[in-house]
Each structure stands twice: as C-alpha cells, then as structure tokens.
Amino acid sequence: MQALVPVEIIERKIYLIRSHKVMLSPDLAELYGVESRALVQAVKRNIERFPDDFMFQLSDKEFENLKSQIVISSWGGMRRANPYAFTEQSYLHIHEHETAHVYLDV
C-alpha cells in the first residue's frame, strides 16, 4: 500500500491561477508516481470523462510569474511546453473515479 502524503505537502502544491485552485501537472503526476507527460496524455485519451473547464495550459506569462514567485528546483531545465493546471474538481475526479489507475495505465 502506498504511503499517504501529508496534507501540508499537498497544500503547498495548490496555486490560485485564473481564479481557480489548481495543481500543476508535474506536481499531480508526482503524487501519482508517473511522469507529467504520461498524466497529460492519459487525461487527453479520456477527455470525455471530464468537464470542459477541468484543465488548462499556463500561458508563458502565467508560467513566468509563477516561477518568479516560487523558488523550487523542479522548474529547472528547458521545457517544451508550459505545464497544465488541473482544477480542484479535476484532480478530485481523477482520484475518485478509478483511483487514477484506469487513466494512468503506464
């Protein structure tokens, strides 16, 4: 059985962007123990299971603002694309339905 993640750790990974509480794809993927790109691909394969506004990709400006506000090493390196932001409803949906294993069959 996988160990529970302390609430404090999860709370530090939740940001307010576009008036939504969101978790970024790298952070959500880390919680599920998968790569960020695998999470995004799995969700896109099952897009019909989610509401229209469950996920959005950060703009260049939003991503730069976020990086300037938060000092963490995991932003390092060049990225091909800006991370996706998953709304609170979407990551609860992933967890409640199938506990992510159906979505994340990697």
Image (cartoon, rainbow, N blue to C red):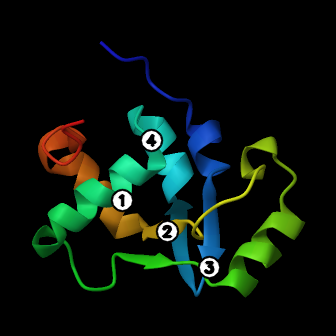
Does residue 60 lie above or below 83 as drawn? below
Q: Alpha-carbon distance for marks 4 and 2?
A: 13 Å
Under mark 2, the amino acid is Tyr
At label 3, counting other C-alpha atoms closer than 10 Å, the crowd grade (few under 14, some 14-19, many 20 or more) is some
Tag shown at residue 6: none
Q: Quadrant of the C terminus?
A: top left
User: Mark 3, mark 2: which one is toward the viewer?
Assistant: 2
Q: Quadrant of the N terminus?
A: top left
Under mark 4, the amino acid is Glu
Q: Which corner quadrant of the image does residue 15 belong to?
A: bottom right
Q: Alpha-carbon distance for marks 1 and 2?
A: 8 Å
Q: Earlier in the sequence, mark 4 or mark 2?
A: 4
Residue at point 19% right, 72% down?
50
Residue at point 35% right, 51% down?
39
Q: Earlier in the sequence, mark 1 or mark 2?
A: 1
Does residue 23 lie above or below 47 as drawn? above
Q: Earlier in the sequence, mark 3 or mark 1?
A: 3
The residue at which mark 2 appears reads as 84
**Secondary structure under badge 3?**
strand
The residue at which mark 1 appears reads as 40
Tag shown at residue 35: 4
Whether residues under marks 1 and 2 lie with C-beta atoms below 8 angstroms apart, the answer is: yes
Q: Earlier in the sequence, mark 3 or mark 2?
A: 3
**Secondary structure under badge 1?**
helix
Tag shown at residue 17: 3
x and y, in percent, of residue 21 in the image: 53, 71
Q: Alpha-carbon distance for marks 3 and 1?
A: 18 Å
